[in-house]
Image (cartoon, coloured by chain):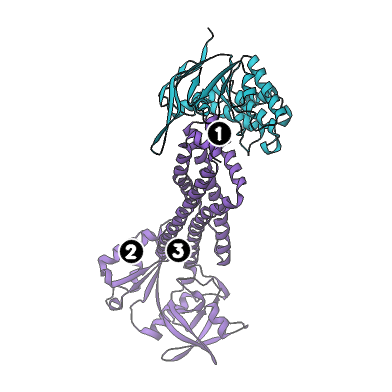
Chain colours: A cyan, B purple
Amino acid sequence: MAESVIRLEDVSRYYMMGDFIVKALDGVSIDISRGEFTAIMGPSGSGKSTMMNLIGCLDTPTNGYIDIDGENTAGLNEAELAYIRNRKVGFVFQQFNLLGKLTALDNVITPLLYAGVSTRERKQMAVHALERVGLADRMDHRPNELSGGQKQRVAIARALVNNPTILLADEPTGALDTRTGGQIMELFEELNSEGRTVVLVTHDRDLGMRCHRQIHIRDGKVEA
Amino acid sequence: MLIENIKLAFNAMRGSKMRTALSLLGIVIGVASVVAILTIGDSASKSITESIAIGGLDMVSIYPSSGQRNTGIFDEAFGDMLRNDIEGIQAVLPQNSSTARVRNGKESINASVAGVLSTYASTLNLEFGEGEFFSSMDNINRRQVIVLGSAIAEELFPDQVVVGQYVSLFRSQAKSYLVVGVLESKDPSISLSYNNSVFIPYNTYSQRFIRTNGVGSYVVKIAEDYDTIEVSDAITEYLDNIVGTDGYSIFSPASLAEMAEQITGTFSSFLALIAAISLLVGGIGIMNIMLVSVAERTKEIGIRKALGASPNVIRGQFLVEALTLTLLGGILGIVLGSLLSYAVTNMLDWSLHLSYTSFILAMGFSMFVGIFFGWYPAMKASRLDPIEALNYE
């Protein structure tokens, strides 16, 4: 049995919408091991985004427990959750979410700033991460000078730079054309083959099937 | 982290130059007015002191009340008594004076006529444009000799050699006086205007004008290394014991200077306080721009939180931004205020005395404004929900 890095135990997330309670996630238990390449799949509104937010510690559950890399996140305050996001999770978003006024290099450096890495080391690590995603020659460009595929590579470099336990990608090819999307997907496969745990959230069936494991969500529950 | 935050702050300012400039203006104007008011105030009081100093900061004048004139206390011997009894007095010069019309043929002018001893000129370091002061023999013999102030000489004898000429002094009777000297022209001062005075021997004056032994006033010259105001206070105490507070009045340029300094000081502090209120208004401008900045950058805040920025880090970022804004405004304000002070003092022909206290005060106050008005927007930024902030468009 491989070591568990993401464990959700009977996790629910309810929202109040006026007088109604919306059960975005309702009693979900999953277990993802180190080195797995998992797709969380489901139609929009199924609760997969809620699940991603919970795994990424951007949100906290109404009920249940979440362990990230063996650490129970229940009862942690904002600063402690920020610490986990910084050290253990690397986010990749559909809309890239780069900081528009910063260069590619400074974007990749940002998580290291919050990790308290020294100035010199920061630069070395960021350059290394950009080289890893094949963007060594675009380091001084700002996001608006980069193509969609390049932007997403910067985002992946940024997610990788702090050597997180989990790479968490939310529809990472959703804003890209098929060919570029395919290249990004190959990059994820490479990273996984190097031993990185990758969780990919998508509604795209073809993309999901390229992952080694699929978790289907519908109406806030895991489908068998 | 601090350096990165300062870089981010400048990034943000570059991103919205016009808005930044406008909200900085409040701080700049506030700081500039505080600096200008304090500096101009300082320069004003120093120039007043300087112009009073021309009249002699080492002198005190004593004026016996009219009721004391004939009691025999304020006679010529009084000066020696004062000098013996009080430390720090170099000389006491008795003096009688009044105004009279000085005439040369058809030309005439009103002047202050003073009867003084022959030591008067040397004691007060008077300088001569022509001739010299009368001698003690002139005084003893009650000769009709006269020394003219520069303005009087210029009026009565334009472009002429004045020494050796005669003038008449008109009061109840006209008598001719031989001019023996003309004083060098001096900057008009507040206390004593030598330019419009004429001087005749003390005894001559007594004989011609009053015919009593009473002395009109005394000029006390303070010895070197003594503080004028302290000696003046000692004289006051001494005279209070002899003739009472109503028996005389005392006047010294030094105490006038001190008073002027106090008045301008109080006045400029008061104005600076009002200017400080404008700084507060500037602070509200800063708060406004920071709130707009936080709202506009909600998405950025969400991304930063996702990347692991804790609430403290976000708050720090926006506080540093507000502080950078206000400090920049402070520096610009100090420069502008100094330039303004330079222009004003230059125009009024005062010497410029930059008030460094006001620099420190203005910097400190603008930092306080930055923290005070930056706190709320920064708190607001740090408390944003990461998911909502990320999804904000």
Going by the numbered disc 3, the residue's amino acid type is Leu
B28 relative to A89, above or below: below
Q: CA distance from mark 3 to mark 2?
A: 16 Å
Going by the numbered disc 1, the residue's amino acid type is Ile
Determine if marks 1 and 2 fall on one subunit: yes
- Label 2, on which residue? B235
Contact (Cβ within 8 Å) of mark 3 with mark 2: no
Contact (Cβ within 8 Å) of mark 1 with mark 2: no
Q: Nearer the viewer, residue B201 or B306?
A: B306
Q: CA distance from mark 1 to mark 2?
A: 79 Å
- Label 3, on which residue? B57
Q: Residues within 10 Å of mark 2 (few under 14, many from 20)?
A: many
Q: Who comes first in sequence, dot 3 or dot 1?
A: 3
Q: Is residue B333 rendered to the left or right of residue A186?
A: left
In the picture, the disc for residue B303 is: 1
A97 relative to B162, above or below: above
Q: Helix or strand or loop: what does disc 2 sit on?
A: helix
Determine if marks 3 and 2 fall on one subunit: yes
Residue A132 is drawn in which quadrant?
top right
Give the x, y percent position of residue B120: 46, 71
- Residue B224 can be seen in this image: no
Determine if marks 3 and 1 fall on one subunit: yes
Contact (Cβ within 8 Å) of mark 3 with mark 1: no
Q: Helix or strand or loop: what does disc 3 sit on?
A: loop
Give the x, y percent position of residue B215: 35, 76
B340 relative to A59, above or below: below
Q: Helix or strand or loop: what does disc 1 sit on?
A: helix
